[in-house]
Amino acid sequence: MCAHKKNISFILAVLALLVSAMGAQSEELTFSASVDRTRVGLDDYLTLTVSVSGKDIGGISQPDLPSLDGFEIVGTNSSSSSQFTLVNGKMTSSKTIDYIYTLRPREVGKITIGAATLKLRGKAYKTEPIEIEVIAGSVSGQGKTQPSPRTSSPSPPSPTENLRSEDLFLRADFDQKKVYPGQQVTVTYTLYNRTQLANVQYEQVPSFTGFWAEEIYNADRLNFQQQVIGGKQYQVAVLKKLALFPTTCGKIQVDPMELVCDLRLRSRDFFDFFGRTKRVRISNKPVTITVQPLPDEGKPQGFAGTVGRFSITASVDQRQVRAGEALQLVVKIRGQGNLKTLPAPQLPPLDNFKSFEPEIQEQMSTTGDKIGGTKTYRYVLIPKQQGQFLIETVQFSYFDPARKAYQTARTEPIAIEVLPGEKGEFPLILGLGREEIKLLGRDIRYIKPSTAAIKDEGGDLYSNRAFQILQIAPLLAIFAAILTRRRRDRIRTDVGYARWRGAYRQSRQGLRAAHRLMRSESSARFYSAMAKTLSNYLGDKLNISVGGITSQHLRDELVGRQMEEQLVQQILDCLHACDYSRFAPASSQLADMETMLKRVRDLISRLEKTGLGTRRRNSSR
């Protein structure tokens, strides 16, 4: 009986220990959210504090905030405190970490701050939602104040907290503000900083309406250089450099670029291990460019609107060719200007040759800050008859803005000798008449086969299926040739169509290049390549300048094509993530880069299956 009572006592003691342990486990973490007030004015600030308390919470991650659509986060802070208790000679400790967010209301009405979430040791925690009433103006006596954290004494302002406009600003420098249509304007966006800068993101990039924009430089990292301006020392970094080519006359305003910058704030709180940051927005001043029309005086005949400085050369792969052989005429235009809008040169009359549409190649280059390069046109020529012929001078007219005058570049004439064929025969060339054809050689001789060798050839030839197919084949070949010719003509004359057709191929090349950068663990260059690949793909598909793709502009374009809102948001999130990773101070891991590569590849594949994969003929701009 005594043994039985001992067993029962032992079991009860074990149960008591389990209940005590479960109670301790349930009390090991407290997760809550609070605000300094539930009624604020539209001109006021609201402080949201998310608190985590418990034992052994070192290395805890920052909680995930709910969607704060009705507020703008204007500042962040954090603080921590520890409490020690001595009971019966045994010391216990607990720690409290406060994550503090300063919010500014965006609209009047009742706004609910949803539940913040936290995961610790596989368990999820949530706070209670909080309802806030926002009124117009300011709550009396509380307008535009930012209360100090509850768990720490306020620290004196640091230079970053009292940010002045001259401490952090963005400037756009244009090399000239009065130009002609098609003349290059170079704009450089430079960041000037005298603060503790933690991160930079593009919030708004100008659309460059009225310009054709080509990128010259795009920073992968903020490469700061020391520079003294007005007696003050600044950290200066070039963010972007673009070549703008005006497409219309008049006064064109270039909208400002806007950046979002996270600034580190100094703190005197001993327990503030996480530091404090403040988010600010900066932008440059808008600039107006005056585009004057090209003069009428001295305008040569056949002038196609090209502006810049160019030279032209012409050559052939052989100056002596036999009958029926083709030769290649290569015309190259070199110089400074917008090669992508360069029209094909006007060839002289080629009455003695049959010519075909040229194959066009572009090789872009940058000299200093000037865009230029070489554009090559390769023509296939087939002589119509034998003899000595001359390919006359090829002319190309352009307007030189430096001289403010029209210029005409010319090639040298090229002599071609056409010899008879190997057997003294000249083949039939499309377009020649019977009187121009010489039949040389022996007379026709009749062949008399042995009657014993004659075999039955079957039914009539016209009833043979293979013969019928052969009759249709030329018609199909002509139809295919017409379609091919139309497609080539459209590619040559419709820049938007050419960009749309080549978008997917170019994106695959960009993804392969990014993959090589990922393997070399160059994270900044990798994310720059990913952003450029996706931006170029969208720019080519939508026929808009790559330098002019902004978040809002891109959203409007995609929504205008009836694209799903979820897919549009995924595209914008992907571009923002690439920008953030490019300028983030820490390098990304290989796994993160592999995830981003797959993310962009899947996005492009999905876009190919949407409305961007099909294009109407009249959709070019």
Image (cartoon, grey):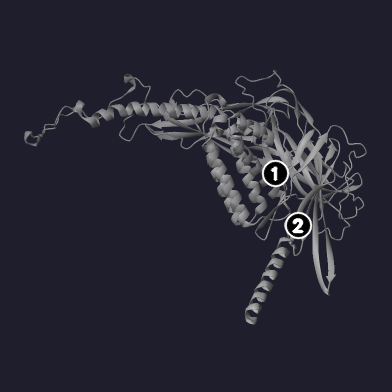
Q: Which residue is mark 1?
A: 218
Compare residues 121 and 368 and report the one nearer the observer: 121
Of circles 1 and 2, the one toward us is: 2
Q: Amino acid at mark 2?
A: Thr
Residue 568 in view of the camera: yes
Q: Amino acid at mark 1?
A: Asn
Residue 355 in view of the camera: no
Compare residues 384 and 587 and report the one nearer the observer: 587
Label 1 or label 2, whichever comes before in sequence order = 2
Compare residues 88 and 106 and report the one nearer the observer: 88
**Number of the label disc, if any, that sits on residue 321:** none
Which residue in the rendered view is the most extreme toward the front? 1
* Residue 410 lies in quadrant: top right
Q: Secondary structure at mark 2?
A: strand
Q: Which residue is mark 2?
A: 30
Q: Position of residue 183 (x, y in %)?
A: 70, 30
Q: Position of residue 500 (x, y in %)?
A: 55, 33
- Residue visible at 70% across and 18% down? 297
- Number of dots carrying numbers: 2
Which residue in the rendered view is the most extreme toward the top? 296
Compare residues 399 and 394 and report the one nearer the observer: 399
- Identify the image quadrant of the N terminus: bottom right
Q: Position of residue 222 (x, y in %)?
A: 75, 49
Does residue 176 lie above or below 273 as drawn? above
Left/right placement of residue 439 relative to residue 499 reads left
Circle 1 packing at 10 Å, graded few (<14), some (14-19), many (20+), is some
- Residue visible at 84% across and 39% down? 39
Which residue in the rendered view is the most extreme toward the left? 452
Circle 2 packing at 10 Å, graded few (<14), some (14-19), many (20+), is some
